[in-house]
Amino acid sequence: MIGIDLGTTYSAVGVVESGFPILLANEEGRRVIPSAVWFGDGAVEVGEKALRRRGVSPVVTSVKRLMGRRPGEVDDFPLPLDEGDRVRVLGRTPEEVSAEILKELKRIAEWRLETEVRKAVITVPAYFNDAQRSATKRAGELAGLEVARIVNEPTAAALAYGLDKLGEKARVAVYDLGGGTFDLSVLEMRDGVFQVLATRGDTRLGGDDLDAALAGWCAEKAGAGAVDGRMIKEAERVKRALSADGEAVFRVPFVDGGESIEVAATRRDFEHLAAPFIERTIDCCRRAMHDAELSPADLDAVVLVGGSTRIPAVREAVSAFFDREPDLSQHPDEAIALGAAIQAGVLTGAVRKVVLLDVTPLSLGIETFGGLMNVLIPRNTTIPAKAGEMFTNAVAGQRSMSLRVLQGEREMARDNWRLGEFEVAFEPAEKGRARVGVQFRIDENGILEVLARDTATNRDTVLEIRDAAVDVDDEKVETMVSESVEHAFDDMAERVFTEARLKAEELLPAVEAVLSQGDGIVPEEEVAGIREAEATVREALDSGDANRLKAAVESLDKATEAVAARMVERAMEEALERRMGG
Ligand code: ADP
Ligand code: MG
């Protein structure tokens, strides 16, 4: 079994040999190959060979950014996208293009190992959602690989870091800034158990953004019009140069067939452009530490991986935030593939004494009455995980209910992503009498299965989110989480209001019914108080003020307490009389 780091910009493959994880190099001696694919007439080239075709005919790069995305969800991709029913580039789905990279890695492994390879562990950013994970798994299958496990990239990096420290207890943060994504995970390692305590990230933040920013800045300085592919490529080169040197020259000949561009850039200039992006990564760090309920001093190490962590300003920002020198023991380009190889070794038994406990990056739940998000599995739950809840019918005689499966951190269902929806049929019953048990199950790969059972008939309906998940809503994962923080107060207020409104809508007609009974169950002296409380509830409903409505509903509840008690008493007396009489 092999381990694969299927990166946005670079990919690598590894295996465990005599207890050691190693990467496998291609014929050119490269252990890390560009995630680039070129399609010719029946021919396909991958890696450097594909990049060499650049300029002659289109080469697909960064296809990972398209994985599991819905039409309209991807902005400024380097190649035109065909977005009919599905996103396609050069007429192929993202899975098909990724499969070519995976086939090449499989080929390298088979050539090096001189044996057929059938199974693989593939890594994905911790922040990949269900659709993106499923798409990655499908890409593996298209490449003729059985995907034994999907592992989160930072977790893989931690495995590589921790393999020779299995006896120690340590808490580490893994900071992974690559070409297209950023991930931060906080892990605890103890006796070979790797437990993820928290994870945060941004699936659209990485070196690519820095290239674009630098290219834009150079174009503006040179008075050139639009930024083109060549300028982005040159910006990347200059960016790398500025990691080592204080200054570098940006040079692109014959822009628009006219003059050449030449701009001198200093590391200072670049750091100025990079600052807002770096700040966003530090925001994630802050949140992850908060989720893990740790402060920087509680950590034993901060491990840096990903090509962009070679940027001095990134190292400085990380070291300032965590108040320590970052750990550079891991090769930034190779740690994740090594970790994937270790996980593959764990699955085959070649590596012992290692257990991996990963967590869910986003909450999973279903929509309930009033459009509320009902969380079944909260974010940062260790997987595999299972959780269930009982739901009931809102209307008498109802024969089915539709279940909307959601992923996200917002209080209102509409603000979260809809992963899938299905109808659960059940035996018609009085209001609140039909019972449907809903169970969420997340497997080791982070892929969700939802099961609904009508408890009257024990009939099951199962929804594999696998395919439905491709239909993820057009919001972005990272905006989801940052918005959940931004809107936390409004969201909470809306939830409180909705819950109070549902209660009020139940209470008001019941109170009306009792008051109009006129059989002495409500003594005269209580009527006025109840009427007043009722009016307050109605006013509060109109006001839209959550706290006011909540308080009003509580007072109405109080005002009718005595009546309710009397009603229960009377019902019991009647029941008793019936039994005595019968
Ligand atoms: P991914 O996992 O997304 O494929 P990698 O971890 O391989 O990405 O990192 C690739 C990114 O690292 C690219 O954006 C590349 O420009 C950047 N990078 C590589 N080396 C350097 C360097 N010396 N200085 C700055 N950025 C670098
Ligand atoms: Mg990477």
Image (cartoon, rainbow, N blue to C red):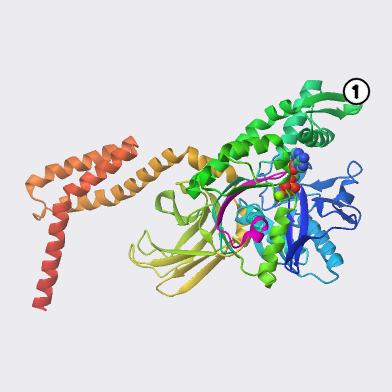
- Above/below status of 286 relative to 248: below
Residue occupying image coordinates x 17% and y 47%:
559
Q: Position of residue 397 (x, y in %)?
A: 37, 64
Camera-side residue of 161 and 165: 165
Quadrant for the N terminus in the image: bottom right
Does the residue tagged 1 have its C-beta within 8 Å of any atom of ligand 1? no
- Residue 541 seen in the current view: no
Q: In terms of image quadrants, where is residue 155?
A: bottom right
Q: Position of residue 148 (x, y in %)?
A: 68, 67
- Above/below status of 325 relative to 166: above
281 left or right of 49 in image: left
- Residue 342 seen in the current view: yes
How many numbered marks have been drawn onto this rendered protein structure? 1
158 left or right of 94 in image: left
Q: Secondary structure at mark 1?
A: loop
Residue occupying image coordinates x 88% and y 43%:
54
Q: Position of residue 97 (x, y in %)?
A: 78, 54
Give the amino acid type for the residue marked by disc 1 in the picture: Glu
Residue occupying image coordinates x 77% and y 30%:
215
Q: Position of residue 207 (x, y in %)?
A: 72, 40
Residue located beneath label 1 in the image: 259
Quadrant for the C terminus in the image: bottom left
263 left or right of 285 in image: right
Give the residues drawn in magenta, as a range.
Answer: 160-185
Q: Is 422 inside the magenta-drawn segment?
A: no
Q: Within 10 angstroms of label 1, few (less than 14), some, or many (20 or more) residues?
A: few
